[in-house]
Amino acid sequence: MTFFHTSGAVTEVGRAKAVREVLENTVPDRDFYILVVGAALLAASGILLDSIPVLIASMVVAPLMWPILGLSLGIISSDKKLIGHSLAMLVVSILVGLAVAALGACIAIKYFNWNISGIFISFSPNYFFDVFIALVSGAIAAYGLVRTKVGGAMTGIGIAVSLMPPLVATGVGLVSSKILSKAALTIFALNVGGILLASAIVFGILKVRSR
Protein backbone atom coordinates (compact mmCIF):
# COMPACT_ATOMS: atom_id res chain seq x y z
CA MET A 1 0.00 0.00 0.00
CA THR A 2 1.24 3.48 -0.90
CA PHE A 3 -0.17 6.99 -0.61
CA PHE A 4 -1.41 6.91 -4.19
CA HIS A 5 -2.21 3.24 -4.65
CA THR A 6 -3.62 0.38 -2.63
CA SER A 7 -3.28 -3.03 -4.19
CA GLY A 8 -6.24 -5.36 -4.14
CA ALA A 9 -5.99 -8.90 -5.40
CA VAL A 10 -8.89 -10.51 -7.23
CA THR A 11 -10.47 -12.99 -4.83
CA GLU A 12 -12.52 -16.13 -5.33
CA VAL A 13 -15.46 -14.20 -3.91
CA GLY A 14 -15.04 -11.61 -6.65
CA ARG A 15 -14.81 -14.29 -9.33
CA ALA A 16 -17.90 -16.05 -8.01
CA LYS A 17 -19.76 -12.74 -7.91
CA ALA A 18 -18.88 -12.07 -11.55
CA VAL A 19 -20.09 -15.49 -12.68
CA ARG A 20 -23.28 -15.21 -10.65
CA GLU A 21 -24.07 -11.76 -12.06
CA VAL A 22 -23.53 -12.89 -15.64
CA LEU A 23 -25.71 -15.97 -15.17
CA GLU A 24 -28.46 -14.00 -13.43
CA ASN A 25 -28.59 -11.48 -16.28
CA THR A 26 -28.53 -14.01 -19.11
CA VAL A 27 -31.95 -15.45 -18.39
CA PRO A 28 -34.29 -15.20 -21.41
CA ASP A 29 -37.31 -14.29 -19.32
CA ARG A 30 -40.12 -11.82 -19.89
CA ASP A 31 -38.22 -8.97 -18.21
CA PHE A 32 -35.26 -9.36 -20.58
CA TYR A 33 -37.37 -9.16 -23.71
CA ILE A 34 -39.49 -6.31 -22.36
CA LEU A 35 -36.24 -4.35 -22.00
CA VAL A 36 -35.15 -5.37 -25.51
CA VAL A 37 -38.43 -4.24 -27.07
CA GLY A 38 -38.54 -1.07 -24.97
CA ALA A 39 -34.97 -0.15 -25.86
CA ALA A 40 -35.66 -0.82 -29.55
CA LEU A 41 -38.74 1.43 -29.46
CA LEU A 42 -36.75 4.20 -27.77
CA ALA A 43 -33.89 3.86 -30.26
CA ALA A 44 -36.28 3.92 -33.23
CA SER A 45 -37.96 7.04 -31.82
CA GLY A 46 -34.57 8.66 -31.27
CA ILE A 47 -33.54 7.99 -34.86
CA LEU A 48 -36.84 9.17 -36.36
CA LEU A 49 -36.82 12.32 -34.21
CA ASP A 50 -33.06 12.87 -34.57
CA SER A 51 -32.88 13.00 -30.76
CA ILE A 52 -29.64 12.21 -28.94
CA PRO A 53 -31.27 12.12 -25.43
CA VAL A 54 -33.79 9.49 -26.55
CA LEU A 55 -30.99 7.42 -28.09
CA ILE A 56 -29.07 7.62 -24.81
CA ALA A 57 -32.16 6.38 -22.98
CA SER A 58 -32.26 3.35 -25.28
CA MET A 59 -28.61 2.61 -24.51
CA VAL A 60 -29.28 2.67 -20.76
CA VAL A 61 -32.32 0.39 -21.04
CA ALA A 62 -30.88 -2.12 -23.53
CA PRO A 63 -29.68 -5.41 -21.93
CA LEU A 64 -27.61 -6.56 -24.92
CA MET A 65 -24.31 -6.34 -23.05
CA TRP A 66 -25.23 -9.33 -20.87
CA PRO A 67 -25.53 -12.08 -23.50
CA ILE A 68 -22.25 -10.86 -25.01
CA LEU A 69 -20.53 -11.15 -21.62
CA GLY A 70 -22.18 -14.54 -21.13
CA LEU A 71 -20.84 -15.66 -24.51
CA SER A 72 -17.31 -14.52 -23.68
CA LEU A 73 -17.44 -16.24 -20.28
CA GLY A 74 -18.69 -19.41 -21.94
CA ILE A 75 -15.85 -19.33 -24.49
CA ILE A 76 -13.18 -18.83 -21.81
CA SER A 77 -14.75 -21.59 -19.69
CA SER A 78 -15.29 -23.96 -22.63
CA ASP A 79 -18.88 -24.13 -21.39
CA LYS A 80 -20.90 -25.24 -24.42
CA LYS A 81 -24.21 -24.82 -22.62
CA LEU A 82 -23.47 -21.20 -21.67
CA ILE A 83 -22.17 -20.48 -25.17
CA GLY A 84 -25.31 -21.82 -26.81
CA HIS A 85 -27.58 -20.17 -24.27
CA SER A 86 -25.97 -16.73 -24.59
CA LEU A 87 -25.66 -16.92 -28.37
CA ALA A 88 -29.34 -17.81 -28.70
CA MET A 89 -30.31 -14.85 -26.50
CA LEU A 90 -28.13 -12.50 -28.54
CA VAL A 91 -29.51 -13.72 -31.88
CA VAL A 92 -33.14 -13.49 -30.72
CA SER A 93 -32.48 -10.00 -29.31
CA ILE A 94 -30.99 -8.91 -32.63
CA LEU A 95 -33.97 -10.26 -34.57
CA VAL A 96 -36.42 -8.59 -32.17
CA GLY A 97 -34.57 -5.27 -32.45
CA LEU A 98 -34.53 -5.42 -36.26
CA ALA A 99 -38.22 -6.37 -36.42
CA VAL A 100 -39.31 -3.56 -34.09
CA ALA A 101 -37.22 -1.04 -36.01
CA ALA A 102 -38.45 -2.13 -39.44
CA LEU A 103 -42.08 -2.17 -38.29
CA GLY A 104 -41.72 1.26 -36.71
CA ALA A 105 -40.17 2.67 -39.88
CA CYS A 106 -42.96 1.19 -42.02
CA ILE A 107 -45.62 2.75 -39.79
CA ALA A 108 -43.83 6.12 -39.80
CA ILE A 109 -43.60 6.13 -43.58
CA LYS A 110 -47.11 4.84 -44.32
CA TYR A 111 -49.21 6.62 -41.73
CA PHE A 112 -47.17 9.72 -40.88
CA ASN A 113 -45.53 10.36 -44.28
CA TRP A 114 -42.16 10.36 -42.56
CA ASN A 115 -39.22 10.99 -44.86
CA ILE A 116 -36.55 8.65 -43.52
CA SER A 117 -33.12 8.98 -45.04
CA GLY A 118 -29.45 8.53 -44.23
CA ILE A 119 -29.13 12.16 -43.14
CA PHE A 120 -30.49 11.38 -39.68
CA ILE A 121 -28.10 10.81 -36.76
CA SER A 122 -24.80 9.70 -38.28
CA PHE A 123 -23.98 6.01 -38.21
CA SER A 124 -20.92 6.24 -40.41
CA PRO A 125 -18.34 3.81 -39.01
CA ASN A 126 -14.91 4.93 -37.88
CA TYR A 127 -13.19 1.57 -37.74
CA PHE A 128 -10.35 2.52 -35.43
CA PHE A 129 -12.37 4.36 -32.79
CA ASP A 130 -15.36 2.01 -32.98
CA VAL A 131 -13.14 -0.98 -32.26
CA PHE A 132 -11.12 0.94 -29.66
CA ILE A 133 -14.22 2.02 -27.72
CA ALA A 134 -15.70 -1.48 -27.89
CA LEU A 135 -12.46 -3.04 -26.61
CA VAL A 136 -12.16 -0.59 -23.72
CA SER A 137 -15.84 -1.00 -22.83
CA GLY A 138 -15.66 -4.79 -22.91
CA ALA A 139 -12.56 -4.83 -20.74
CA ILE A 140 -14.05 -2.46 -18.16
CA ALA A 141 -17.34 -4.38 -18.13
CA ALA A 142 -15.61 -7.68 -17.40
CA TYR A 143 -13.28 -6.12 -14.82
CA GLY A 144 -16.19 -4.30 -13.16
CA LEU A 145 -18.02 -7.57 -12.60
CA VAL A 146 -15.09 -8.85 -10.55
CA ARG A 147 -14.27 -5.61 -8.74
CA THR A 148 -17.23 -4.23 -6.78
CA LYS A 149 -16.06 -0.61 -6.86
CA VAL A 150 -16.00 -0.62 -10.66
CA GLY A 151 -19.36 -2.37 -11.05
CA GLY A 152 -21.26 0.92 -11.03
CA ALA A 153 -19.64 1.83 -14.34
CA MET A 154 -21.90 -0.56 -16.29
CA THR A 155 -24.41 2.17 -17.16
CA GLY A 156 -21.68 4.39 -18.54
CA ILE A 157 -20.27 1.48 -20.51
CA GLY A 158 -23.68 0.81 -22.02
CA ILE A 159 -23.87 4.42 -23.20
CA ALA A 160 -20.31 4.52 -24.51
CA VAL A 161 -20.40 1.40 -26.62
CA SER A 162 -23.87 1.98 -28.15
CA LEU A 163 -25.36 -1.40 -29.09
CA MET A 164 -29.09 -0.82 -29.58
CA PRO A 165 -28.99 2.40 -31.71
CA PRO A 166 -26.91 0.94 -34.58
CA LEU A 167 -28.94 -2.28 -34.46
CA VAL A 168 -32.21 -0.36 -34.74
CA ALA A 169 -30.72 1.93 -37.40
CA THR A 170 -29.99 -1.22 -39.38
CA GLY A 171 -33.66 -2.19 -39.18
CA VAL A 172 -34.79 1.32 -40.15
CA GLY A 173 -32.34 1.28 -43.03
CA LEU A 174 -33.74 -1.99 -44.35
CA VAL A 175 -36.96 -0.08 -45.02
CA SER A 176 -35.61 3.30 -46.05
CA SER A 177 -31.90 3.43 -46.83
CA LYS A 178 -29.50 0.62 -47.71
CA ILE A 179 -26.55 2.95 -47.09
CA LEU A 180 -27.73 3.67 -43.53
CA SER A 181 -28.41 -0.02 -42.93
CA LYS A 182 -24.95 -1.15 -44.07
CA ALA A 183 -23.09 1.51 -42.07
CA ALA A 184 -25.09 0.89 -38.90
CA LEU A 185 -24.72 -2.90 -39.15
CA THR A 186 -20.94 -2.46 -39.48
CA ILE A 187 -20.85 -0.40 -36.28
CA PHE A 188 -22.98 -2.96 -34.43
CA ALA A 189 -20.78 -5.86 -35.56
CA LEU A 190 -17.59 -4.03 -34.56
CA ASN A 191 -19.04 -3.23 -31.13
CA VAL A 192 -20.13 -6.80 -30.46
CA GLY A 193 -16.80 -8.20 -31.64
CA GLY A 194 -14.77 -5.74 -29.59
CA ILE A 195 -16.74 -6.36 -26.40
CA LEU A 196 -16.57 -10.12 -26.89
CA LEU A 197 -12.81 -10.15 -27.46
CA ALA A 198 -11.84 -7.74 -24.67
CA SER A 199 -14.14 -9.26 -22.03
CA ALA A 200 -12.93 -12.77 -22.87
CA ILE A 201 -9.31 -11.65 -22.45
CA VAL A 202 -10.04 -10.00 -19.09
CA PHE A 203 -12.01 -13.03 -17.86
CA GLY A 204 -9.06 -15.19 -18.89
CA ILE A 205 -6.47 -13.01 -17.16
CA LEU A 206 -8.53 -12.84 -13.97
CA LYS A 207 -9.21 -16.60 -14.14
CA VAL A 208 -12.98 -16.21 -14.08
CA ARG A 209 -14.68 -19.46 -15.07
CA SER A 210 -18.35 -20.40 -15.25
CA ARG A 211 -17.81 -23.62 -13.27
Image (cartoon, rainbow, N blue to C red):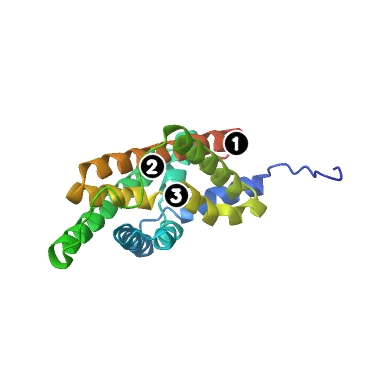
Disc 1 versus disc 2: distance between alpha carbons? 19 Å
The quadrant holding residue 126 is top left
Label of residue 207 in the image: 1
Q: Residue furthest left?
A: 110
Which residue is nearer to you in this view: 152 or 72?
A: 152
Q: Residue at x 60, y 36 (%)?
A: 207
The residue at 20%/47% (across/down) is 174
| Amino acid on which disc 1 is placed | Lys
Q: Amino acid at mark 3?
A: Met
Of badges 1 and 2, the one in the foreground is 1
- Disc 3 from disc 1: Cα separation: 20 Å
Q: Earlier in the sequence, mark 3 or mark 2?
A: 3
Asked if the residue under mark 2 is in contact with the one under mark 3, i.e. CB atoms within 8 Å, the reply is: no
- Residue 49 in the image: state x and y as whole percent: 32, 62
Q: Which mark is residue 65?
A: 3
Which numbered disc, 3 or 1, marks the residue that appears first in the sequence?
Answer: 3
Mark 1 near mark 2, Cβ–Cβ under 8 Å? no
Residue tagged 2: 81
Q: Could you tell me how far apart the alpha carbons at marks 3 and 2 are, in whole angstroms?
A: 18 Å
The answer to whether 185 is drawn above or below residue 117 in the figure is: above
Q: Nearer the viewer, mark 3 or mark 1?
A: 3
In this picture, residue 148 sits left or right of residue 42: right
- From the viewer's perspective, tell me whether residue 170 is left or right of residue 19: left
Packing grade of label 3 (10 A; few <14, some 14-19, many >=20) is many
Percent x, y of residue 160: 50, 49
Q: Position of residue 13 (x, y in %)?
A: 65, 49
